[in-house]
Image (tube, helix red, strand yellow):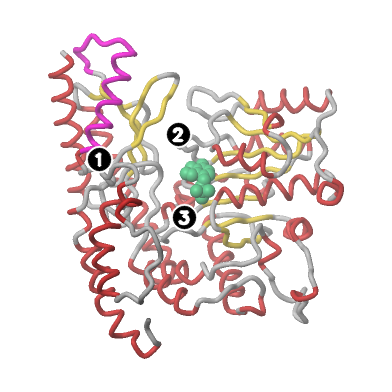
Amino acid sequence: MLERADFLEAMAPVLQWVNTYLQSIEKYPVKSQVAPNAIYQALPASLPRAPESIAQILKDLEEIILPGITHWQHPNFHAYFPANSSIESVLGELITAAIGAQCMIWETSPAAAELEERLMEWIRDAIGLPADFEGCIQDTASSATITAILTAREVKTDFQANEMGVPPNLRVYCSTETHSSIEKGVKICGIGSRNVVKIPVDEQQRMIPELLEKHIQADVAKGYLPTCVVAAIGTTSTVAVDPLPAIAAICKRYQVWLHIDAAYAGNALFLPEYQWMIEGAEYADSFVFNPHKWLFTNFDCSAYFVKNAEALIKTFEILPEYLKTKTRGQVNDYRDWGIPLGRRFRALKLWFVLRSYGLEGLQQKLRKHIELNHFFAEQIAQHPDLELISKPFLNFTCFRINPKNGDYNEHQLNQLNEDLINRLNQSGKAYLTHTKINGQYVIRIIFGQTYIEKRHVENVFQLIVNHTKELLGTHS
Ligand code: PLP
């Protein structure tokens, strides 16, 4: 058991450990190679009775825990979307833990509330959201989307759903490609997954606005209440960008809440050359993106913006006696801006990142990742056994094995590509994931790790080529 006076001495080996980890992260297999239950079995069955030393805990961290870690900060982590971190973020997080504030209301830490308010303004202005949006930090895009759907539900029902229960005729619209968190959110909001209307997409996986309007019209005719449309800026599978201006016009026409889920690709809005993605956002009601995905700020940190903060607060507000304060109304009490009462001081790590990078540093890093992706995609396009599935976009590319001189049917190609991913991931040298587009099994790759260099891109390309060669050898 440590006392405050022990901090420096106890911290020394921990700092050493973190430093060694960060410097030598590339020696670890990117994807954990442990068998199911191995870590669980290696842990003692009960709480230790006697105090144990930090040295003992660090030893077990190395021996028991580390083998079961997938190294998200490894430069060859190319799976899902990244959850990148940075030295600045780690420093901020350390201080957050030391301060240990629970920032539910302004009075429980005025600086936490006001820093959050200010940072959300910086970000709103930097990414080109209109000035009438106000923001707060949420844990995840999933929670932010639930927050948006709940507010839309209350606005549509004149705040009656909160009091009387949810009517069965509310409808939420999104494309067939939107993230699963939308349907999950609709279920949690009591609207019912049957009331999620999935709008078909075009050949570039973008929502077709004409079909959205047709569905809304048909629903209105049947007595449904169109409540919320969720548009995606950067779908999970292929980073498709829904046509916002057309969708926004429809939402305005039918008075439907428009929520924009830009969880990942929203980070690119710091670059003026990607501002086109947000055209039409002036008609949106809410917007979310995750600095914890591609803004060098470790998980969790999700930036949620809303135009009508009053409606948001009215949706969530509840005022037991013990939370009444004299400052109410003069300041932001963020407990009323989302689901939980308790809130972490997430703004601090973001502040460290935003200040240490500055807008120019953020832009430089984002552009570097985008350039690396283009470099990778060129190599894929030139290789006779590999096929680019779509043009590289941001730091994301989709490809598959498809030999130009081969005679493989789609089923065989799917199997080859699945085998390729398995081999790559089992090698421990890189981690990639897949998706299916029109029945084709394709491989997704993302270059979003904070400290990635060109050599890491060359390495993963060579790895792909080598395993492809081996696979085609065994399959021919
Ligand atoms: N929306 C999109 C487009 C996503 O890609 C993801 C996750 O990858 C989410 C929402 C969910 O994000 P979170 O994990 O922050 O809830």
Spatial distance from mark 2 to mark 1, Cα to Cα? Answer: 21 Å
> What kind of residue is marked 3?
Phe
Name the image quarter holding the C terminus: top left
> What kind of residue is marked 2?
Ser
Disc number placed over residue 375 in the picture, else none: 1
Spatial distance from mark 3 to mark 1, Cα to Cα? Answer: 22 Å
> For the residue labelled by badge 3, is the local secondary structure a helix, a strand or a loop?
helix
Spatial distance from mark 3 to mark 2, Cα to Cα? Answer: 22 Å
Disc number placed over residue 237 in the picture, else none: 2
Q: Measuring from the top left, give residue 209's x and y in whole percent.
A: 64, 28
Name the image quarter holding the N terminus: bottom left
Q: Nearer the viewer, mark 3 or mark 2?
A: 2
User: Does residue 357 sit above or below 304 in this rendering?
Assistant: below
Q: Measuring from the top left, give residue 85's x and y in whole percent.
A: 37, 60
Q: Nearer the viewer, residue 396 or 89?
A: 89
Picture quarter containing residue 424?
top left
Disc number placed over residue 57 in the picture, else none: none
Which span is picked out in magenta?
Answer: 403-426
**On the picture, is 252 further left or further right than 440?**
right
> Is disc 3 in contact with disc 1, using a CB cutoff of under 8 Å?
no
User: Which residue is tagged 3?
Assistant: 270
Q: Measuring from the top left, give residue 366's x and y in whole percent.
A: 37, 53
> For the residue labelled by badge 1, is the local secondary structure a helix, a strand or a loop?
helix
